[in-house]
Image: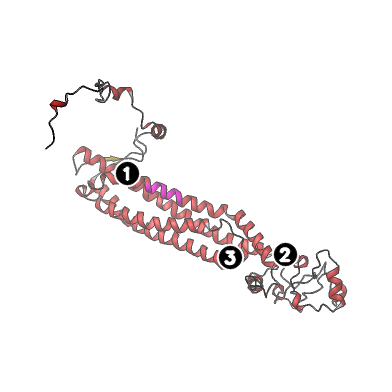
Amino acid sequence: MAVLKVKFTKTKRDKLAQILWILNWVSVVSGIILFSLGLFLKIEIKKRNEVMAKGDINSVPNMLISVGVIACIINFLGGKICYDCSDANKFSRWKLVMLPYIVCTFCFTFCILVGALMCYTMKNELEESLYLGLRDAIKFYKDTDIPGRCFLKKTVDLLQIGFHCCGNNGFRDWFEIQWVSARYLNMASKEVQDRLKSNVDGKFLVDGVPFSCCNPSSPRPCIQYQLTNNSAHYNYDFLTEELNIWVKGCREALLDYYTTIMRSIGIAALLIWLFELCVLIGVRYLQTAMKNVLLLGDLEGESDGWLLENSFVETAKYNISIIKNLGKANQISTVSGMNDPNINVQNTDCGKTNVSTKSIPAAR
């Protein structure tokens, strides 16, 4: 029994073909939108590639870009097919192409769904990439005279100013590393020597942060050194007073930024997937209706269209049987073997036969 069977007159078939022709061109635009969203996300990730560890974070934008290009190609072809389906004579040349086209389009719409879901499942990979990348960027912040690292100070400063953040997890990350280059330290100073000797690694550690952590909206001048020393500043209590530096870590700030972008892209991709699925269902109805009208031989008469020719269970069993038989393509069934002329052929005697040399004419 056919699933969701609908009866179509010639007028309904023509209208369906015209509507699907328009919708396929709208789908081409949706493919361009998917391509643009993927390209936008790829550019945004590329902008801050210096503070991200290498990983699979580009899989989502690459997926959206690929699906967008395929959408333009498939829907352009679909528009041509639907336009010709308004004429039964023109449909005959697409008759054998329609079903493979529907299968390919179904796989393509599934890829859109996968791309949309990837926008929501990428958060963990992105967070790990940001954590490792920011950790290394802050670690090499002081290396302004080393090739390959000299740009990191500017990158981190612009990042902290632009995203109103400080450190990786928070401003205390700067307390655990030496972020002032040794070339700017007075090694003859007793204070510097004491600080270098105060830890096992011999690093110049201070309870201070770079200038880019300062909050310009604070009415008090920025306190970026001796943040935990209440006696170093007038009317200051580190534990109770609101600090005039950014408290949020840059990993959290960047993660919120990219999560917002990917959530918006995911919603757009889901809407496009639903739209493409509706178009695919319409094309399936048009294909079955036109196929049946050709079988009936009455091009002006009514015909049935359906989503599936058999029930879901029967269709599933049929497809499973096809998959199981794929590995048995080289086996010969007993039924077909009865009529196979190549079976039960009597063996001929291929042994040597004594031939008289005289019967063989000599070459001249």
Q: Main secondary structure of the magenta part?
A: helix
- Callout 3: SS: helix
- Residue 324 visible in the current orientation: yes
Q: Amino acid at mark 1?
A: Leu
Looking at the image, tell me whether mark 2 or mark 3 is earlier in sequence order.
Answer: 3
Picture disc at residue 170:
2
Q: Is residue 127 left or right of residue 243?
A: left
Query: In the rendering, at what x and y percent does residue 217 appear?
Result: 70, 76
Q: Are marks 2 and 1 in contact (CB under 8 Å)?
A: no
Does the segment drawn in magenta span residue 360?
A: no
Q: Quadrant of residue 161?
A: bottom right
Q: CA distance from mark 3 to mark 1?
A: 44 Å
In front: 263, or 44? 44
Q: CA distance from mark 2 to mark 1?
A: 57 Å
What residue is shown with label 1? 99
The magenta-colored residue range is 104-111
